[in-house]
Image (spheres, helix red, strand yellow):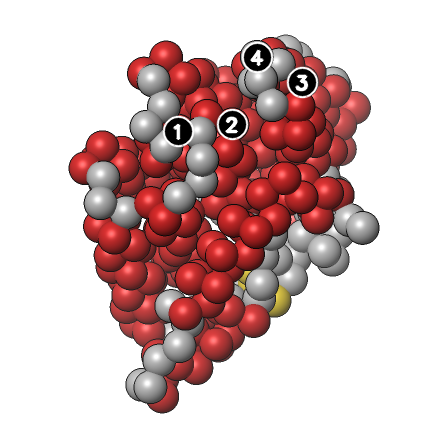
């Protein structure tokens, strides 16, 4: 049995209920919409965010219909954001498979992303909890502002580690934070437990994105993007940010400026990737990731039910050690 199956064991029935609800959204009598939804549905996915939501709900109460509807909502929101992101980033692949915009076109992709977002809102409404709905709308705004901040930061000449953390919080960790908070809200957990759940989700999300960014420094067909792809798009991530800020290499500083202007070629980006590796960038990124992992595990250690505590600990380990 794979590690995710083991993690799901304490909530297997509840997770399967979520999956059945989620799959219903991908049925449509409209030919074009149906074809796009079929393509998205066939990509599968690990459903990490709804799994976290359900585990947190189980940690603080009994999983119920509100929990499951909210889990559907967060996965639809995440799926919509991926469809929109591929348009913004002009990506032709999503985890090694053709993106929606590459198979269809940008107009269809944006509209289908909007359809999924609307379906997400509908699922949150079905959860019948205004606090959950408010948290969901807040995270929608945060996700969008993260994309805008990332675009703005490309033209910023400063290479800032602080800005990097703010971007990955908004773009990634805020949704994990919301998932954990919504899980606790769905079972009417006390305010203090909701706060701890959100802190846990944020720490997991920061770990998730740093691990994702490290992937960009290595070739992998499973990941579905070439080495240095982020820098080809003008984005600087933690390994190269650390290496540049902790060296006096003028040649690499010039290359970073070229990356931000969009003028760097693949050979130059390859040199920056090698520079980051040789100057402690990868090791530093791992050390920061481990700080967030330790924070998450500290919160999990206070959960009473052993099966859920163990599942969440394994979840954190999976996020920090995954290979794709």
Residue of label 4: 302
How far apart are the two marked residues, 2 and 4, measured between alpha carbons? Answer: 10 Å
Q: Are marks 4 and 1 in contact (CB under 8 Å)?
A: no
Query: Nearest the camera: 175 or 242?
Result: 175
Q: Earlier in the sequence, mark 3 or mark 4?
A: 3
Query: What SS does tag 2 mark?
Result: helix
Q: Residue visible at 24% across and 56% down?
A: 122
Q: Earlier in the sequence, mark 2 or mark 3?
A: 2
Query: What SS does tag 1 mark?
Result: helix
How far apart are the two marked residues, 3 and 4, measured between alpha carbons? Answer: 19 Å
Whether residue 30 is visible to the viewer of this picture, yes or no, is yes
Query: Nearest the camera: 208 or 98?
Result: 208
Residue of label 3: 290
Residue 82 appears in which quarter of the rendering? Answer: bottom left
Q: Residue visible at 46% across and 25% down?
A: 60
Q: Residue visible at 33% across and 68% down?
A: 112
Q: Earlier in the sequence, mark 4 or mark 1?
A: 1
């Amino acid at each position: 049995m794979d590690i995710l199956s083991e993690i799901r064991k304490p909530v297997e029935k509840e997770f399967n209920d979520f999956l059945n609800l989620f799959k219903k959204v991908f049925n449509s009598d409209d030919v074009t919409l149906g074809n796009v939804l079929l393509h998205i549905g066939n990509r599968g996915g690990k459903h990490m965010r709804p799994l976290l939501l359900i585990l947190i709900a189980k940690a603080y109460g009994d999983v119920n219909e509100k929990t499951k509807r909210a889990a559907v909502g967060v996965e639809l929101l995440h799926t919509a954001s991926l469809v929109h992101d591929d348009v913004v980033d002009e990506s032709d692949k999503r985890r090694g498979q053709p993106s929606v915009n590459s198979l269809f076109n940008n107009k269809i992709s944006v509209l289908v992303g909007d359809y999924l977002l609307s379906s997400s809102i509908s699922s949150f409404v079905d959860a019948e909890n205004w606090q959950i709905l408010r948290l969901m709308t807040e995270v929608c705004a945060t996700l969008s502002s993260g994309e805008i901040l990332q675009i703005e930061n490309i033209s910023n000449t400063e290479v800032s580690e602080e800005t990097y953390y703010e971007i990955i919080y908004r773009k990634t960790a805020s949704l994990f934070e919301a998932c954990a908070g919504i899980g606790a809200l769905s079972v009417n957990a006390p305010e203090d437990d909701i706060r701890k759940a959100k802190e846990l989700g944020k720490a997991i999300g920061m770990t998730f994105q740093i691990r994702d960014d490290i992937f960009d420094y290595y070739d992998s067909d499973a990941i579905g993007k070439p080495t240095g792809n982020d820098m080809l798009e003008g984005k600087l991530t933690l390994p190269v940010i650390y290496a540049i800020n902790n060296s006096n290499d003028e040649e690499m500083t010039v290359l970073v400026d070229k990356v931000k202007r969009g003028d760097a070629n693949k050979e130059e980006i390859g040199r920056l990737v090698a520079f980051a590796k040789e100057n402690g960038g990868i090791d530093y990124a791992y050390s920061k990731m481990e700080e967030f992992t330790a924070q998450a595990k500290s919160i999990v250690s206070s959960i009473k039910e052993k099966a859920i505590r163990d599942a969440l600990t394994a979840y954190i380990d999976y996020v920090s050690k995954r290979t794709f």
